Image (spheres, rainbow, N blue to C red):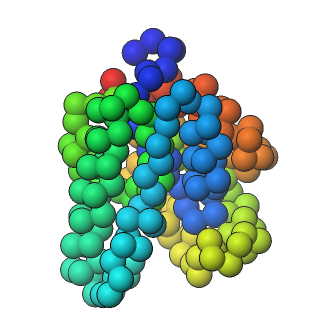
């Protein structure tokens, strides 16, 4: 694909808690003529009783609900893309199998993957200083970072945003996601 970005498609914005996914996604969306956001947390919050976090217990129920979330996220994304919107998907893509499922469910539409990869210290600080309604109680950063690197280190664009503010990060995503993070054109 050339350096010109498509008018519609899906940019999956991934990263650890506190990486800046939600903030950056909103800022980036404003830079497209037509853009929509789909956020895994919002889809998961539709479950009002019996919700289990993707990394929670029991593991079989967490996996079942994660698969449901992926189907709902991609259905929303596909509807927007098919109506010529750029979709910014906020989802922590944990492993290659999840990425493969997301790609299968969005096929044949264009997809870029941008993994926001600030340092663990930056993620912890951002998570601790954000609005309490947006904050996560999470202490598995070291293990999660190792898993993400092992599973997805060669997929898409790993973007170290440690020294960048949200506006700078969003502008770079809009400019470079389709050349650096392209998974499928």
Tell me where residue 4 appears, x and y as whole percent: 50, 14
In this orientation, which residue lies closer to the viewer: 43 or 33?
A: 33
Query: Where 45 sits versus 149, above or below?
Result: below
In this orientation, which residue lies closer to the viewer: 95 or 91?
A: 91
For image coordinates 57% across by 39% down, the residue present is 29
Is 28 left or right of 69, judged from the image as shown? right
Location of residue 22 (image quadrant): bottom right
Query: Where 127 sits versus 80, above or below?
Result: below
For image coordinates 43% across by 21% down, the residue present is 6
In this orientation, which residue lies closer to the viewer: 120 or 133?
A: 133
Location of residue 173 (image quadrant): top right
* Quarter of the picture holding the C terminus: top left
Task: Residue 100: tell me if it is visible.
Answer: no
* Quarter of the picture holding the N terminus: top left
For image coordinates 32% across by 87% down, the residue present is 49
Number of dots carrying numbers: 0
Is 183 left or right of 161, judged from the image as shown? left
Query: Where 103 sits versus 5, above or below?
Result: below
For image coordinates 22% across by 46% down, the residue present is 105
Is 131 left or right of 106, judged from the image as shown? right
């Amino acid at each position: 694909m050339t350096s010109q970005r498509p008018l519609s498609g899906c940019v999956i914005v991934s990263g650890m808690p506190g990486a800046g996914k939600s903030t950056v996604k909103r800022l980036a969306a404003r830079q497209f003529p037509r853009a929509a956001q789909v956020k895994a947390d919002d889809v998961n919050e539709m479950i009002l009783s019996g919700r289990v976090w993707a990394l929670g217990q029991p593991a079989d129920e967490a996996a079942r609900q994660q698969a449901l979330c992926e189907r709902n996220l991609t259905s929303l994304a596909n509807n927007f893309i098919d109506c010529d919107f750029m979709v910014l998907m906020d989802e922590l893509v944990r492993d290659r199998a999840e990425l493969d499922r997301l790609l299968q469910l969005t096929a044949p539409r264009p997809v870029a993957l941008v993994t926001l990869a600030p340092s663990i210290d930056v993620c912890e600080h951002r998570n601790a200083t954000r609005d309490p309604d947006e904050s996560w109680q999470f202490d598995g950063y070291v293990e999660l970072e190792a898993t993400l690197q092992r599973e997805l280190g060669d997929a898409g664009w790993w973007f170290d945003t440690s020294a960048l503010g949200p506006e700078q990060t969003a502008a770079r995503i809009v400019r470079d996601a389709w050349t650096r993070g392209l998974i499928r054109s």
